[in-house]
Amino acid sequence: MRLDSDTWLPLIRPASEPRRLRLVCFPYAGGSPDLFRTWAAPLDPGTELLAVRLPGRGPRLREPLYDDWGPLVADTCGALAAAGVLAEPHAFFGHSFGARLAYEVARRAAADHPGMTRRVFVSGCRSPDHPQHLPYLHTLPHDTYLDSVRAMGGLPAELLANRAMLRLFVPTMRGDMRLAELWGDMHGGSPSTVPITAMYGRDDPVDGRAATLGWPRYGGPGSELLEMPGGHFFLDTHRELVVKTVNARLVNDG
């Protein structure tokens, strides 16, 4: 797998004053770095903003998708290291599938570069000890799958109306969702040293409060669980509040 840091890790916004840390964002299933472009203006000026671009989207559209967590985490960490991110102060943010990846990357980064990973934000994601909600969505027939994702608020109407775009988008989203649904505790319950800020949507039918209660036990000192208004995609519907929450922690941690 190619480890081109520009391809993997597009820069969304440089710090506009001496950089205090870098924030690396991980989109939800099927998502791209574009999800975080609206974060550029409200984010703290001392924070550089980057986002991970996985295979199956943008210039990586024709690259094979990952089907196992081990290579995905190893290659993502390799791209971050190649870009010089892990050796300097940084934090991670991920939502849903992206939260799982952010957490796994944070564990490895903290082990390889102690003290540099200041915080990981896990948003809209069950804790590692909580079982996956059944049935697995990634196994559903095409139309049932689309109906289920649409009911969660994860498919905009303009995408649903564009069959050509759906043919490109759905396999990537389904592949990410497969990894997300099969993910669990891969570390025997041992906590990370990195502080975790876990956020859940008050009205999330999948990964609400009950599914996320365990997160503070998996992080270092300063870990917390926060309720947000909205459903599973509160990252989109309440973006300003999410960015405000991230800003407050990064300024304090930086």
Image (spheres, rainbow, N blue to C red):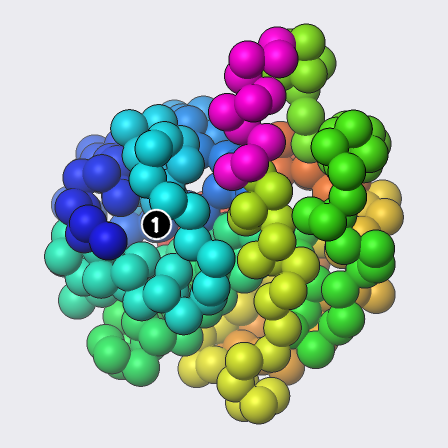
* Residue 77, horizontal then vertical, whole percent: 28, 63
> Residue 242 vs residue 40: left or right?
right
Q: What's the residue type where badge 1 is placed?
A: Leu
Q: Residue at x 80, y 52 (%)?
A: 206
181 drawn magenta: no
Q: Quick check: 230 above or below 190?
A: above
168 drawn magenta: yes
Residue 118 visible, this orientation? no
Residue 112: image quadrant is: bottom left
Q: Quick check: 17 above or below 197?
A: above
* Residue 71, horizontal then vertical, whole percent: 36, 65
- How crowded pointer 1 is (Cα within 10 Å; few <14, some 14-19, many 20+) is rated as many
> Residue 119 vs residue 99: left or right?
left
> Residue 175 vs residue 152: left or right?
left
- Please, what secondary structure does the residue beneath circle 1 have? strand
Residue 185: image quadrant is: bottom right
In what quadrant of the picture does the C terminus appear?
bottom left
Question: What secondary structure characterizes most of the magenta part?
Answer: helix
* Residue 157, horizontal then vertical, whole percent: 70, 14
Q: Bounds of the magenta span?
A: 162-172
Q: Residue at x 50, y 25 (%)?
A: 168
Label 1 belongs to which residue? 23
Q: Residue at x 33, y 40 (%)?
A: 63
Residue 191 visible, this orientation? yes
* Residue 110, horizontal then vertical, whole percent: 33, 76
Q: Nearer the viewer, residue 122 or 174?
A: 174
Q: Nearer the viewer, residue 232 or 146?
A: 146
Q: Nearer the viewer, residue 145 or 207?
A: 145
